[in-house]
Amino acid sequence: MGLWDMLTGKSAADAAKAAAADTYGKQQGAIAGINQAGDQYADRFAGLAKGYQPWQTTGLEANDAVRRLMSDPSSVRSLPAYQFLLGEGTKAVDRSAAAGGSLFSGRTGKALESYGQNLADKTYGDQLSRLLGISQQGLGATQAGINTEGTGLTGQLGARTSAYNGGMTSAGTIGQGNVAAANAETQGLQNLLNFGGQLAGSAFSLGSGGGGFGGGAGKKGLGSLFMGGGSPSGF
């Protein structure tokens, strides 16, 4: 750092620019860190939201089953539960009829028909209720997944908003450094002007002391200022 650089303000200008660049770099690093933290936050909640997918899948499957059941109510007769209960009920009616001696009577046939019809109605209602319950569970899981992922996205938005505000602030950092550098250079120019004025005034004073700049004493005094002669007053 030379005397000339200090006098002209170059040293101060360079320091101002360097400080601004350092601050800007730190601001940009902080902004990148905030954005990264926001992305990680969103990813974490997105992972939690995926945990609801199995229930969402079964809920959709239940919806499809409800549509099929309502379009063909008789399809309940193909359900394993219906087949099992029908077999057990038929055996019970047959045993009762056999015990009463009316196994092959019309009344037994009507009893079997009535039992099968009532069982189909009950099975239909039970199956529909069961499927609607699973569908509702899937809907709840879907909503929970959306809320969970939304929490992550909200956090990410908050981080990015903070980073954006930081970016707007950092955008002026370099400009502020340039302004400070310009001020330092302006001050340096003023310093040069002041020094030049002092130098001219001292030279004039030395010259006039011998009867003007043309006088011998004046020439000697002015020469001593630049050639290492006796130091004039004030320098």
Image (cartoon, rainbow, N blue to C red):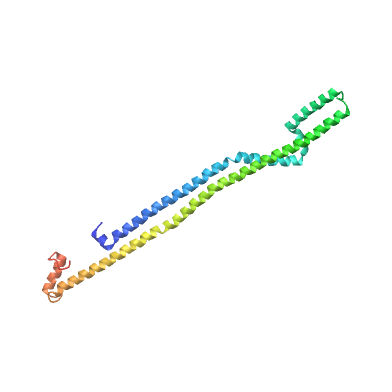
Q: Position of residue 124 (x, y in %)?
A: 75, 37
Quadrant of the frame with the C terminus: bottom left
Residue lying furthest left: 216
Note whether 102 is above or below 160 in the view shown: above
Q: Position of residue 26 (x, y in %)?
A: 39, 51
User: Residue at point 27% right, 63% down?
Assistant: 8
Note whether 66 is above or below 3 in the view shown: above
Whether residue 153 is visible to the viewer of this picture, yes or no, is: yes
Q: Position of residue 51 (x, y in %)?
A: 57, 40
Residues 149 and 12: in front is 149
Residues 95 and 4: in front is 95
Note whether 201 is above or below 83 in the view shown: below
User: Residue at point 88% right, 27% down?
Assistant: 105
Q: How many marks?
A: 0
Residue lying furthest front: 100
Quarter of the view holding residue 222: bottom left
User: Residue at point 73% right, 40% down?
Assistant: 68
Instruction: Answer with left or right where residue 10 lies relative to residue 161.
Output: left
Quadrant of the frame with the N terminus: bottom left
Q: Position of residue 112 (x, y in %)?
A: 83, 30
Whether residue 60 is visible to the viewer of this picture, yes or no, is: no
Residue lying furthest bottom: 211
Instruction: Answer with left or right where residue 73 lies relative to residue 180.
Output: right
Residues 214 and 47: in front is 47
